[in-house]
Image: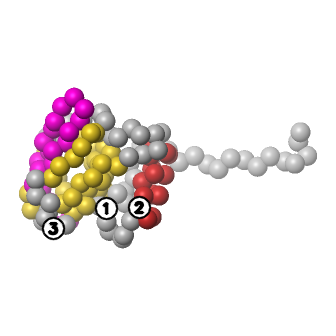
Amino acid sequence: MKKLFLSTIFTTLSIMPVCAADYIITSDKPVKAVYVRNEEILSAKPLYTLDNSKENIIISVKKDGKTAILVNRFDEEIILEVKVKKGEINIKNADGFEYFPIDTPPEKLEILPPPAKKNQNEN
């Protein structure tokens, strides 16, 4: 699941302009829509993966300041208070959410070795 998720992110980022996405927020429930109170500070867009889990939000930081992100889940709406300082974000009211910089993989990332080659003599 994480491999599929990260593959989708890297594919998406490879076609986006450089520095277009700074952070990713993952939710423990599917996200229906995302709204930003002040879009001069940051922008937020849901990221739809191949498995259509709808649990990810891409955050692009534009400038320092304070704003809020309204996350509309299918069963509730949550307001995340966001403070941007020197290009780094701090999110309050983030129960059920995790966030990390796009260029830093999650700590629990498991990278599997490549599969072993089979000898052609073995049948």
| Disc 1 target residue | 21
- Say which element carries label 2: helix
- Quadrant where the image shows the C terminus: top right
User: Left or right: 114 with respect to 93?
Assistant: right
Q: Residue at x 87, y 48 (%)?
A: 120
Type of residue at label 1? Ala
Residue drawn at x 23%, y 54% is: 44
| Residue 63: % across, % down | 15, 67
Q: Residue 80 at x, y = what percent?
A: 14, 45
Q: Is residue 98 magenta?
A: no
Give the x, y percent position of residue 35.
17, 49
Out of 2 and 56, give the one closest to the viewer: 56
Q: Is residue 19 above or below residue 52?
A: below
Q: Which amino acid lies under the numbered mark 2 shown in the image of this protein?
A: Leu
- The residues bearing labels 2 and 3 have C-alpha atoms spaced at a distance of 21 Å
* Circles 2 and 3 in contact, beta carbons < 8 Å: no
Cα–Cα gap, marks 3 and 1: 13 Å
Q: Magenta span covers which residues? A: 67-88
* Main SS category, magenta section: strand
Q: Which mark is residue 13?
A: 2
For marks 2 and 1 on the same chain, the one whose residue lies earlier in the sequence? 2
Q: Horizontal placement of 112 versus 109: left or right?
A: right
Residue ID for mark 3: 63
